Image: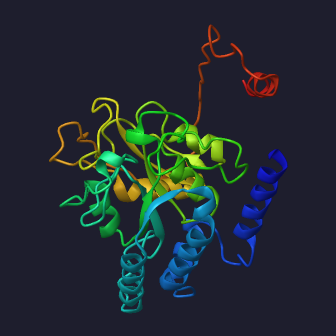
Amino acid sequence: MGQALACSSVIILRIKKRGQKLPGTILELSDLIRRRSISPVELTRGCLARVEELNPILNAFITVTTESALADARRAEEEIKRGGWRGPLHGIPIALKDLIDTVGVRTTAASALFKDRVPAEDAEIVLRLKKAGAVLIGKQNLHEFAYGGSSIVSDFGEVHNPWNLAHITGGSSGGSAAAVAAGLGYGAIGTDTAGSVRLPAACCGVVGLKPTYGRISTRGVIPLSWSLDHVGPITTTVADAAIVLQAIAGCDRNEISSAEVPTRDYVAALQETPGALRVGIPRSFFFDDLDQEYRRGVSGDY
């Protein structure tokens, strides 16, 4: 059984790399799209083909919005041809944790209780992604109601880690992290109440960002704990996370917890030097039961 799982993981990674001559990041692709060196339709079809091939193994998606995604991609392509490039997410395939409301597309929270729940309007972050020209390719599996850290508990089946099918993806945004790691889209939007973006990102080897509370609107996101819930991007690089954050951050005056703080150019901020930086490590519990490899790494860095 263990050998079979390991072989399946190798197959997944080979599929991910096979014929993949295009750059794999939003930052690189956005420039090619802007210069019309690559088509949003081509990108979207490629992502949907990978979803079709790999999702039966990974179970990262609950709903795939093939027709609307291709329509969005064609619209983006026509706009760009007319000189209407909206920014670095224009024409980029992105997916959403299935906890985020999408008008006309079911939002289940990975629960049979909500298997037929179809929202009447988009969440605020979905509106912002659409305004940025992103191509939304589907809704991703999660730990049911975001209440868990493994993504094993889902009425639509557990999510599998693309690096090793015997390992968990972490949770609760497990489908989002697994999909990004396997190349099923160039980014995803997850939610984080107690680690639900950061844990699956770590388990799947991708970048997960939990922003400051109130930086991104949670209006239209099924809540777990309204005073702790965050929305955050999952991507393959830090620069890509900054691009997605740029598109979805900002005050939402229709949400009481949204912070009235101006956004900044997060991509440009990556070029700034941090200056004096002090990192605190809670020695009273941080090193308890920690693997020696991690202990040595942390001790060596700090």
Count how many numbered circles sit on residues in the image.
Answer: 0
> 287 or 224, which lies in front?
224
* Residue at screen point 42% across, 34% down: 147
Give x and y (percent) for residue 54.
62, 65
Residue 265 appears in the picture as rendered: no
> Residue 11, percent across and down?
77, 63
Q: Residue 26: percent from the left, percent from the top?
A: 54, 66
Does 128 sit left or right of 199 as displayed? left
Q: Residue at x 36, y 92 (%)?
A: 82
Q: Quadrant of residue 184?
A: bottom right
* Residue 193 seen from this side: yes
Q: Residue at x 59, y 29 (%)?
A: 277
Q: Nearer the viewer, residue 272 or 181?
A: 181
Image: 190 above or below 171: below
In the rendered structure, the answer to whether residue 75 lies left or right of residue 237 reads: left
Q: Nearer the viewer, residue 271 or 280?
A: 280
